[in-house]
Amino acid sequence: SGGILLAYRALANSVGSNLHDGPKIDGFTPSQRFFLAWAQAWRQNVTKERALQLLTLDPHGPNEMRCNLPLSNIATFHEAFQIPEETDMHKPIDQRVDIW
């Protein structure tokens, strides 16, 4: 999650405004659009058979995990979408990993 945090900080510095309260486009704040762009980068459409094959061939985890797990550790993601506690994307503060 360090890379995405660094990219988020760079965006905040370049925009020079609060990303949570900036102008909305299509109903999304700049902060929300940033995280949606991250998710779009990891999108894939594969069959179940191909996904299982990738588990044995690809040294990386599945794209869904590579997208969602880092986001669940980022406070600004939780703030941007007001992630409810009862959802899979919510991770309690005391369980979040913050390496950087």
Image (spheres, rainbow, N blue to C red):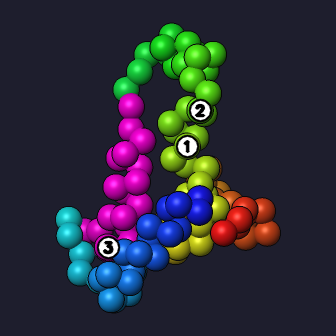
Does 23 sit left or right of 65 as displayed?
A: left
Measured as percent of width and height from the top left, residue 33 is found at 32, 64
Label 1, secondary structure: give it: helix
3D distance between C-alphas at marks 1 and 3: 22 Å
Q: Which mark is residue 30?
A: 3
Q: Does the magenta stretch include residue 56?
A: no
Does 99 sit left or right of 78 as displayed?
A: right
Q: Name the one closer to the observer, 2 or 21.
A: 2
3D distance between C-alphas at marks 3 and 2: 29 Å
Q: Name the one closer to the observer, 44 or 89.
A: 44
Q: State the residue at coordinates (39%, 38%).
A: 43
The crowding category of the residue bearing disc 1, from other C-alpha atoms within 10 Å (few below 14, some 14 to 19, many at least 20), is some
- Say which quadrant the N terminus sits in: bottom right
Residue at numbered disc 1:
66
Measured as percent of width and height from the top left, residue 98 is found at 70, 67
Vertical placement of residue 60 versus 17, above or below: above
- Say which quadrant the C terminus sits in: bottom right
Q: Which mark is residue 60?
A: 2
The residue type indicated by label 1 comes to Arg
Measured as percent of width and height from the top left, residue 14 is found at 32, 81
